[in-house]
Amino acid sequence: MASAKKELISGVFFTAIARYAGIAVTLAVTAILARLLTPDDFGVVAIAVVIVTFFDMMSDMGIGPAVIQNRSLTDSDLSSIFSFTILVGVVLSLVFFFSSSLLSSYYGNDKLTVILEWISLAVFFYCIGIVPDNLIKRDKKFKYLAKINIIVNSSCGGLAVLAALMGWGIYSLLVVPIMTPAILFCLKWKEYKLKPTMFIKWTSLKKIALYSTYQFLFSITNYFARNFDKLLVGKWFGTTSLGYYEKSYRLMLMPISTLSHVISPTVQPVFASFQDDKKWQCEKMLVILKFLAFVGFPISAFVFMCSKEIVLIVFGSQWEPAVPIFRILSISVGFQILYSPQGAFFQATNAVKEMFYCGLVTSVLCISSVIVGCYWAHSLDILALLIDISYLASYFITYYVILKIVFNHDVLCSVSLLVEPLILSFASLSLLYVYQELFSTGHLFIDFFAKGILFCSLMGIFELKTKRIRAFFVQSPKTTDFHEN
């Protein structure tokens, strides 16, 4: 058990390094490109990225998590699965390429055709990288994964800026989504040197078929829940408004990625080693959720109070219309941080069937909120607020299923673990509000720096008094009481 905790913390550490470095690179690159390119350029590429994300999800078909979870796969099985991903990658990239004209005509934007044709390459490289990527995660080679991600993301980000400076315009935004998966595949394949086979063994695919099917169905529903808003905003509000909305949404996702996406990639590989010990898994899950709550909710308060400074400092004054959208979306950051690792908890417990049905319900909530915001209210601000509400509801629905059905545990702990973090977040909100109303200088950098000092000081005092966050890293969790039905 001690080694499992060491593996989890080690995985979190190296994943955090890669994630934080990636965020720093993304912020730097985006800050430069936002000053060289127009919101319309970002809006066009945002549509392309949403579509290519769908094709990436289609190509995965739930194979990645299944490779991590299934410990009975032989080298021959892995070669057959790898060959299958190559076949799927070729087919999907060709479908993507030849459907680019049809997709661009839907949005009435001719520039989108060429963008989609080029970005079809990303679909192929993502697909063939599925097996080597998840083998690295299965074997817990988090240090190697962090190293190559930092090197590749930094290099491709620098090339994108160079391309923009050389006058490539909108095409400079294609450097990262195309080159990153291509180079990462080469480096990951080198680690395992998987050999494709002439004939695919269907018996190998059958070993992961059931698990992959439910994972794939969940990915489809989750994709539409996460991207349906961008598709409708681009259609009904135009690419410029989509550019403002998309940048607000991505900026809102950064603190979520900073926390939950550091932990989530580590959870399944480590938890999968204890597939038959539900009590151990539940105890560790609650420890992780409490840690995320103590960090996530105060960050949500900080981002809400610093929304104007963050948007204008990162993107520049031409992006000021994105401020109110970003401010509203930031309300749900705490709940989204808690919600994000739910997929890994379902996967590690082999509860992918429950994950799919739960995802179906929450996806209907999210999609309904988008339809109401776009068609009925026709307001990006109301749309952002409705999305916040749908994420809050998704948190409670999902962890009710995990605790009650998967672990047969008391569901009230999903509420009780929020009490102290919410109190801390309201204290942060109050402190920053007092500064903003009484001491604000009107200077973006000074106000942001001052608010940051106040926030960090409050968090530091809280941690010194309670040691709540430190407990995640240095203390063993107390045994959780289980309540049978």
Image: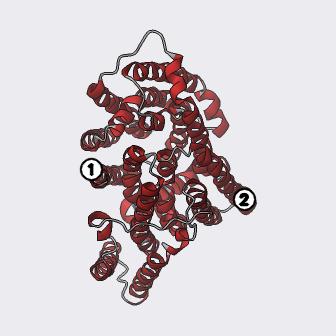
Q: Secondary structure at mark 1?
A: helix
Q: Is residue 338 above or below residue 445?
A: above
* Residue appearing at x 68%, y 60% in the figure: 373
Q: Position of residue 395 (x, y in %)?
A: 57, 62
Q: Which label's residue is closer to the chain start, 2 or 1?
A: 1
Left-right relation of 221 to 124: right
Q: Secondary structure at mark 2?
A: helix
Toward which corner of the image does residue 149 lie, by quadrant?
A: top left
Which three-letter amino acid code belongs to the residue tagged 2?
Val
**Amino acid at circle 1:** Phe
Q: In x, y percent, where is residue 183?
A: 32, 30
Per the image, the residue denoted by label 2 is 372
Quarter of the image where one finds residue 443: bottom left
Residue farthest front in this picture: 484
Viewer-side residue, 243 vs 27: 27
What residue does disc 1 label? 14
Question: What residue appears at the point 66 percent right and 62 percent down from the top-left corner?
Answer: 379
- Identify the image quadrant of the C terminus: bottom right
Q: Residue furthest right?
A: 376
Q: Is residue 51 left or right of residue 292?
A: right
x, y percent for residue 370: 67, 56
Q: CA distance from mark 2 to mark 1?
A: 41 Å
Question: Camera-side residue: 321 or 306?
Answer: 306
Q: Residue at x 34, y 78 (%)?
A: 455
The picture places residue 204, in percent across and down from the top left corner, at 49, 21
